[in-house]
Amino acid sequence: MKYFPLILAGLLRKKTRTLLTLLSVVAAFALFGLLDAVRVAFNAPDNVAGIDRLIVASRFSIIQPLPYADYNRIRLLPGVKEVAYANWFGGVYQDPKNFFANMAVSAKSFLDTHPELVMPAAQKAAFLKTRTGAIVGQTLADRFGWKIGDKIPLKATIFPKKDGSNLWTFDLVGIYHTAQPELRGLEQQMFFHYDYFDEARQFGQGTVGWYIVKIADPAHADQMAQTIDHLFANSSNETKTESERQFQLSFAKQIGDIGLIVSAIMGAVFFTLVLLTGNTMAQAFRDRIPELAVMKTLGFSNGAVLRIVLAESVLVLLIGGAGGLVAARTILPVIAAASGGQFDLPMTDRTWLLGLLLMLLIGILVGLPPAWRAMRLKIVDALAGR
Amino acid sequence: MTALVEIRGVSKVYERGAQKVEVLHHVDLDIEEGDFLALMGPSGSGKTTLLNMIAGIDTPTDGTLSVAGRRIDNLSATALARWRAAHVGYIFQFYNLLPMLSAQKNVELPLLLTRLSAAQRRRNAGIALQLVGLADRVSHKPGELSGGQQQRVAIARAIVADPTLLVCDEPTGDLDRQSAEEVLGLLQKLNRQYGKTMIMVTHDPKAAEYAKRVLHLDKGTLVETASA
Ligand SMILES: Nc1ncnc2c1ncn2[C@@H]1O[C@H](COP(=O)(O)OP(=O)(O)OP(=O)(O)O)[C@@H](O)[C@H]1O
Ligand SMILES: [Mg+2]
């Protein structure tokens, strides 16, 4: 720590150069912060609440419904604790631009199988007993300024009512939130009663979109999935059962492998950063060869000189990297506000941690070559300018 | 009683590609404690090479070198660095202060390698700067000082850790007459008043007059001459 003024002096020697380097580090890490938030949101939930859930859907397509009759057969399998079901509704609120997920669910079993959706007991009770009741996530409620007691009209895009009308009106009776910030994406959804939906819709009665199966032992998830698929093998409605995580991943894959894209972009950005700062550090080192030789003459050991030079580049990365992540942290809510809450990407601890790791790694990577050369520097040669 | 510095049969060979050049040939030399030795000789005769070996920043190819009874020719790089920090103050021709640091911080530099507290470091550096007559320049950067002043800061840096030896390689080579005399007077004062053992390489016979003893190097061999 007492070498700190020396390290600082090394950096302040060429202020413009250090500033430019710092700015490129800030830019790179700001981009990292933003993209990693996107990646987290998409790859999302390492939803611990969901590890004991399997999704049973049609083997052929997610939009192919399954008969409601499957419900009891699945429920009676040993190892199954509870079965819920859901059906995609695809309703539009006011304008198609206002997209959000809305679906009909088996209210009680759905809430029982999804403990990560938290809401006051009174609201929960109100939902269970209100046939036309609906619940929405906090983010979604904020986005449209909805309050409990509001009537929410949705225009059906798939399911007209029996009377031919496309207008479905729901009573907002509950607003849920999620405990963990990385699950906040779940707060952008709306759920209402399957019973009400199934009775009122024009076609498709007695079918559900998919089943959600809560199992007793997550360790046997693969086995359970096979058992369920066996049950319906060779029937007219064969199923494909996956863990919820697999299901979400394959759903996200339809959009593209976001994780891969983000990694590729970040790889390119950091590669450039390493080249850029590496070059600057090498230049800074050459300028300071006589100084380093003098320090060694005074009795600074090879190891001390190595550490001082290395500390300089690590410090640049830490300062710039922290600046970049703070910038990203500041920009994310702006994006969220500008998109009306649609892109409300949280910055998780994991991103900070991964960022810190990258700062240290790149700092060492970039600083090691000059630090190594500083360590090997022969005093007499350096003093004589050889 | 053995001498403070004992040099026995020291040779130095540099390899330039396939070619070997012997720069020093079997040098024997004793330097007593409290001596002020001037090393003279033509350019390329090996003065700097010999001085650097006494200062522990270069090692002999052959022979032995002891300071205060301790062999330094066979120390590891780390041990040698530690030895330098404790025993050697080096004064360069071109001062070699760190340009980003104030005079005060430059003088404190060697003390970073000691166990002294920050306050003690500041105080000792202040005393050293006072001794070289620059108490009023502590916060100046090297670029804001004249050549003579910079060299005096460098002298303060060399003495601040109270080393066993002060070695100077043409300390006045870059200075005008007036500043040179100030610097030489200061070195002489350090030798006479504070008993510092001093080894100085110089081209300048006038500078050599300040020493107690003058030795000549010629093509890597010592030739002794008496002096004041
Ligand atoms: N690291 C080295 N590699 C090769 N040759 C060297 C090296 N160091 C010194 N020499 C050579 O050794 C000889 C003596 O060098 P040295 O620097 O000791 O001379 P000097 O007496 O100090 O000369 P000057 O008065 O010019 O400073 C010179 O010929 C020099 O070129
Ligand atoms: Mg020389």
Image (tube, grey):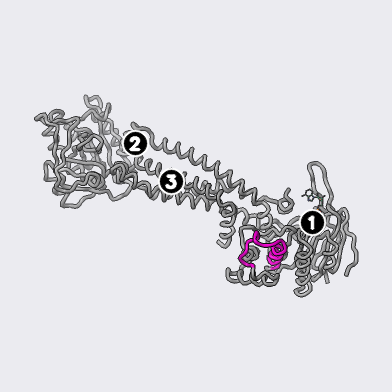
Q: Which of A288 and B7 is in front in this view?
A: A288
Q: How crowded is mark 2: few (under 14 residues within 10 Å), some or many (20 or more)?
A: some
Bounds of the magenta segment: B137-159
Q: Which mark is drawn over residue A376?
A: none
Q: What element carries label 2?
A: helix
Label 1 C-beta lies within 8 Å of the nearest ligand 2 atom: yes
Do the residues marked 2 and 3 share a common chain?
Answer: yes
A370 with respect to B3 (left or right): left
- Disc nearer the start of the sequence (2/3): 3
Find disc 2 in the rendering and name its residue: A249
Q: Work out whether residue A112 can be spotted.
A: no
Would you say residue A110 is visible in this rendering? yes
User: A123 or A246: nearer the eye?
Assistant: A123
State yes or no: residue A311 in magenta: no
| Badge number at residue A30 | 3
Residue type at mark 2 is: Leu
From the image, give the main secondary structure of the stretch colored magenta.
helix
Magenta residue check for B146: yes
Mark 1–mark 3 Cα distance, whole angstroms, equals: 52 Å
User: Which quarter holds ligand 2?
Assistant: bottom right
**Mark 3 and mark 1 in contact (Cβ < 8 Å)?**
no
Residue to which mark 1 is pinned: B48
Pointers 1 and 2 in contact (CB under 8 A)?
Answer: no
Q: Is residue A181 above or below residue A102?
A: below
Tell me: residue B224, above or below residue A189. Answer: below
In the image, residue B178 lies at what x, y percent?
77, 65
Q: Mark 3 lies on which chain?
A: A
- Determine the CA span between mark 2 and mark 3: 26 Å
Is residue A232 toward the left or the right of residue B172 in the image? left
